[in-house]
Amino acid sequence: MSKTLQAIRGMRDILPNEMTTFHTVEAGIRELMHGYHYQEIRLPVLESTELFKRSVGEETDIVGKEMYSFLSRSDEPMTLRPEGTAGCMRAGIEHGLFYNQTQKFWYLGPMFRYERPQKGRYRQFQQWGVEAVGIEGHQIELEMILLGARLWQILGITDKIQLQVNSLGSPACRQHYRALLQKHFHQARDQLNEAELQRLARNPLRLLDSKNPALAELIASAPRLDMHMSNEAKAHFAALTQALTEMGISFVHNPHLVRGLDYYQHTVFEWVTEALGAQNAVAAGGRYDGLIEQLGGQPSSAVGFAMGVERVAALLKEDSIPKVMPDVAVFAVDNDIAVQVQAWTESLRDALGLSWSITMDHQGGSHKNQSKRADKLGARASLLIDKDAWEAKAAPIKTVDGWVSVPLGKVAEWLRLNLTQEKV
């Protein structure tokens, strides 16, 4: 007997009983993006590998060991996108959307990274991303943070999430600081494991957010970037933190907060939670001036962030999200009239429109069994039509208030009159 096939490790099925939670998150995102007038963009899942090497950075963990890359049939290096910013910038450059223009984009879809699967982390995951291009200053960074704060409010999870902010300074500040960090950690290289030694050589800033408790003292004694930033960079960050305070957005300045992608500079931020164990980052982003030019476009400022949909969905209380029940359930009690009842159900959909959820039972069986299935289904109105009712051109309708018989031609009108107020 052949082995039962299962999903690939790190890839998960999102089952129907979970979809209500995901739809709640996605509906909140769409409401938010409409309210702030951001435009949706849909991007390819597959991109040239070179795009991520040039944007994310060849020395990052993502490019070094987490990408799903392969050669196409024509020997072109391809990669399943590990993040959305690079593809969004590529699209803007390719279609001339950035030249002397400002743009505010958002996208939602799957990303792929080869990581160790654990709670809140999968190798295929859904990500919501927001990007603003051509806007300088700290106010657009403030808007990005306000978007996150507003979504947590919409979803009712504000009390579960904390904002952390930091500044990486200018590229010149960061380069100088990188050298200081390498010198600091190199003196204790015997305390570093193999992965940490690789980070020391490639991207020493990532050592600052290491979860290895053995490095806690070494990290605490490391040079602080804010002590080595230019006056201009300090002023930029001070303006943002002052604005956050004035807007009533609580935050923590985390001087060890860095982002694992090479394109970040100046402001970086993360929304974190203690409710998901080790995977505490829910959303993160920052400013990435220079990326568009790096990818072949005209120099332009840019800022954005991304959120893991699975992680936010995991924060929602399932009992606070109502289960999706149909508005109307139709049962043909006698098989002899099943096709006629199904045709009539289609006319009911025509009359009510598809904003009404109407399901038809196709299992057949006795009136008693179908009535039990109707109760279990939980529709607000169940129509159990047997041969006698059909010949009498009447529909027996069961609601929480009991039974009523309505002429078939009047059912749509009756449902609107008796259920619409409850539906709204």
Image (cartoon, rainbow, N blue to C red):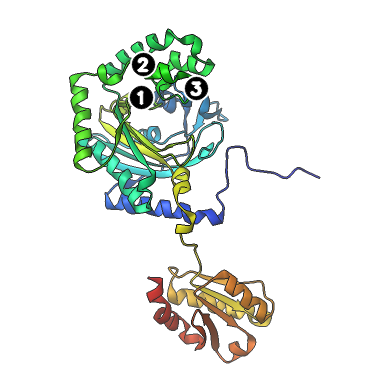
| Residue denoted by label 2 | 222
| Residue denoted by label 3 | 64
Q: CA distance from mark 1 to mark 2?
A: 9 Å
Q: Position of residue 155 (x, y in %)?
A: 38, 52
Q: Nearer the viewer, mark 1 or mark 3?
A: 1
Circles 1 and 2 in contact, beta carbons < 8 Å: yes
Q: Nearer the viewer, mark 2 or mark 3?
A: 2
Can I make out residue 139 in this image?
yes
Report the residue at 55% width, 26% height from top: 75
Can I make out residue 97 in this image?
no
Q: Is residue 289 above or below residue 215?
A: below
Circles 2 and 3 in contact, beta carbons < 8 Å: no
| Residue denoted by label 1 | 256
Q: CA distance from mark 2 to mark 3?
A: 25 Å
Q: CA distance from mark 1 to mark 3?
A: 22 Å
Q: Is residue 280 above or below residue 388?
A: above
Q: Is residue 104 above or below residue 165?
A: below
Q: Nearer the viewer, residue 292 or 265?
A: 265
In which quarter of the view is residue 354 placed?
bottom left
